[in-house]
Image (cartoon, helix red, strand yellow):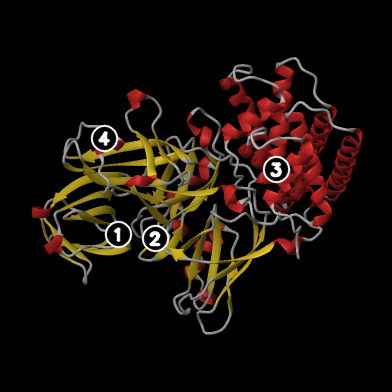
Amino acid sequence: MYSNITWRIFDSLVRHYSKADQNTPKPDTFRQFSNAKLLQIMLVLDGLDDPRYRRSHALHNDLGNNIYGTAVSDVNVAAGTITQGTVVWTVDTMLYGIILSGGAYTTFTARVLAAAAGVYTLDVLSGALIDDAAITQMYVFVGDKFGASWDTGELRFRRVMGIHDFVSTLERPFFGYDRFEMFQLVGKDYAMDAEVAYYSRAGVFQFKTGTDAPTVNVPTVEFDCMPSIYTEQTGDNRIELLPEHLRMLFDGVAAETLTLLNKPQPEDLKARLRDDALTFFSARASENREKALQETMVNK
Amino acid sequence: MKFSNITWQQYESMVRATAGADRMEPPSVLFREMSNVVLSYLFRVLEGKHGHEYRKTFNLVLTTDEDTLQFAAIGALQLDPVQGALFIRSNAYVFRTGDRLFMQGVSTSEAEIAGFRATVVNGGLTAMLSDVVINGVNQGYIPTLADYGSGAALKVVHSHALQVADLSGLYMKAIVGATDTGPGETRIWTIIKNYRVFRQLVLDDAYDAEVAAYLRGDVLEVFVGTDADAIAGGVLEYDGRPEEYAIATQDNEIELFQEYYAMLYDIMLGWTLDWLRKPKDGVLTQRIGQHLEMIGEVKAIERGQQ
């Protein structure tokens, strides 16, 4: 859990401390001060290994399909099957569904295990199916088959930790390549015939699936994310910084605000800022030393 | 008694009385949050002296890695790019970056099932969305929140992991360990820190009868080997951070050692007097100066150790 403090409360606290009104500094300028300081603190003090910033995201299209009660000929809860002739679901696709039964509804997440003559056997991961006699309507989002490349859109990655999928119920990590040349040569490496490789280029993942590798199914990318920044919309969000680092954010932004207002900084604030600067310096020196040590070990 | 015997409510009354402040100024919420800033700051600087005192336990509840929000929990929804940034807002639920959202329900205006899916690109109570696809009977129609009836549901898919425990309510610093009593006696779980190692456990015969866990954000993912007994009564032990001051915790004792309590009190008294634009007396200024000096010394030692 991050701090309990929202951006808006933080804004009020700093402005009052600096004896600033709501217009000077302008809200947008204040937000930029805050975001710059937030990212600096996170960069220097949190390192790359804090699990708090780890997130995951499923890499597949979700294409909508409507199936109505009349088109579903059977839902067998005990067997975990749906029989319908409206659309074709291929094996390994994901279904996110809702079934309406009169005024009530049930939702489910399922993976298609087998498809034969319109009978689809599902691995219901969560939620529940409902007996066909009670269905008024059914509607599903269908996870499309996986492609050879994937654009992660607006997701703000700091570092990709890895990508994995499931082969039956077994997790399978993909091989990540940092170097373009190595990735392009994967197809010539027999050792990779049964593996899946990926390469990341500016928010786009490229994949190569070995000739003997099982089909790729709903890969999940795991990544270190950037903290949520302060915008007009996110004013009520908690600041995504560890609570013990909030004081640094407070002091850093207060100092910028006082400077903008041409006001002197109190002595205790100056002392803390000096101290924070030393902490930054020390943390970076420590990080650099660790990196150097790691590189030395790799080179050996 | 591990910590101070003083509750947050008592502490606030004492600070306000000494500063000659009423209940309105400084506003309660700002007083609470500034107290939390100072509390966390003191904890960061002074922790380690009594680390084990912050060890806590938590009973794990394992589920799939997704949530379902009912209509009433959604405060606002904006899916029309013409109106500006796309977002969804909840009053209590915190969306996580990377979540996949699937809204399913009956559109009251369209009188049909209508839905959308989206990706959360910036988490929080307000989640910024991208990658929005709308589906329903009327493909060209962009639904608003008002279109959905009270039976509508929002599915929030974090990942496809099947056994996870939500730790988002914990002020946790690090995991100490996890156990359960599934085999009829205490079983210690293996905590895995490396992503690749955790994902490959299924291939490792040595883990067929074991349980392992991996922390991702506020989510603890759990691996159960094919021959392992089912999990029962899972308990997490962790190094915590001090509980923050909120309305719900006002009668709880402050999780700070008694010997550091004066620091919190003095610094917040100084802050309150500043807020009221009142001068600090010489003794208080001197004490705050001494506290800062001590904090500076501790931090210098810490930097030296780094």
- Asked if residue A288 lies left or right of residue A168, the reply is right
| Numbered mark located on residue B35 in the image | 3
Tell which tag, 2 or 1, sits nearer the viewer: 1
- Asked if residue A263 lies left or right of residue A197, the reply is right
Question: How far across and down, in percent of the image, does residue B195 sit?
Answer: 55, 57
Considering only vertical position in the picture, is B80 above or below A110? above
Earlier residue among tags 2 and 1: 1
| Numbered mark located on residue B143 in the image | 4
Earlier residue among tags 3 and 4: 3
Name the quadrant containing residue B23: top right
Marks 4/1: CA distance? 28 Å
In the rendered image, which quarter contains the N terminus of chain B?
Answer: bottom right
- The answer to whether the residues at label 2 and label 1 have Cβ atoms under 8 Å apart is yes
| Numbered mark located on residue A166 in the image | 2
Q: Secondary structure at mark 3?
A: helix
- The answer to whether the residues at label 2 and label 3 have Cβ atoms under 8 Å apart is no
Question: How far across and down, in percent of the image, does residue B92 sit?
Answer: 46, 46
| Numbered mark located on residue A111 in the image | 1
CA neighbours of label 3 inside 10 A, class few (<14), some (14 to 19), many (20+): many
Residue at the location (25% across, 63% down)? A122
Residue at the location (20% across, 31% down)? B140
